């Protein structure tokens, strides 16, 4: 497995990036990180595909997958509805 950081690097400490967001280096082992990445790809196979949210009319570069409730304007839904503003949904029920 390829890792980004080797154990020979100096010890790194947790640090607050912005209020409420803390970076905790080495909190997950490379194996745990790989398992999460593998599960993400598994979840993304369906029933709802990966999506990129739009913020102020601009599509974000990050992709997410819904694991439960899907929020449509102002209320949660258990079924994803296809809409002109959100063409990446399938109308499939969420698990």
Image: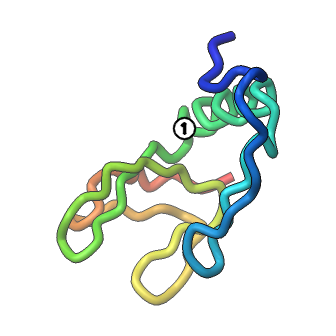
5 versus 85 height, above or below: above
Picture quadrant where residue 26 is located: top right
Asked where in the image residue 4 lies, by quadrant, the reply is: top right
Q: Residue at x 70, y 20 (%)?
A: 6
**Nearer the observer, 48 or 8:** 8
Work out whether residue 31 or residue 39 is closer to the camera in this orientation and state it. 31
Colour mapping used in the image: rainbow
Q: How many marks?
A: 1
Work out whether 19 lies above or below 48.
below
Local packing at callout 1 (Cα closer than 10 Å; few below 14, some 14-19, many 20+) is: some
**Residue at coordinates 65% horizontally, 78% vertically from top-left?**
20
Quadrant location of the N terminus in the rendered image:
top right
Left or right? Give the position of 58 relative to 29. Answer: left
In the foreground, 4 or 51: 4
What is the x, y in percent for residue 81? Answer: 40, 64
Residue at the extreme top of the image, as rendered = 1
The answer to whether 27 is drawn above or below residue 57 in the figure is: above
Residue 74 image offset from top left, x and y in percent: 46, 89
- Residue at x-position 68% and y-position 63%: 15
Front-most of residues 71 and 53: 53
Left or right of residue 78, residue 49 in this image = left
Look at 29% across and 71% down and name the residue there.
55
Q: Position of residue 25 (x, y in %)?
A: 72, 46
* Badge 1 element: loop
Kindly identify which residue carries mark 1. Answer: 44
> In this view, which residue lies farthest toward the front?
10
Residue 48's spot in the image, x, y percent? Answer: 50, 47
């Amino acid at each position: 497995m390829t890792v980004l950081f080797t154990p020979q690097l100096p010890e790194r400490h947790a640090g607050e990036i912005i209020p409420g967001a803390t970076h905790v280096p080495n909190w997950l082992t490379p194996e745990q990180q790989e398992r999460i990445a593998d599960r993400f790809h598994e979840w993304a196979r369906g029933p709802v595909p990966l999506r990129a949210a739009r913020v102020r009319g601009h599509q974000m570069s990050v992709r997410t997958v819904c694991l439960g409730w899907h929020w449509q304007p102002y209320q949660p839904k258990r079924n994803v509805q296809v809409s002109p503003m959100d063409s990446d949904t399938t109308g499939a029920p969420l698990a």
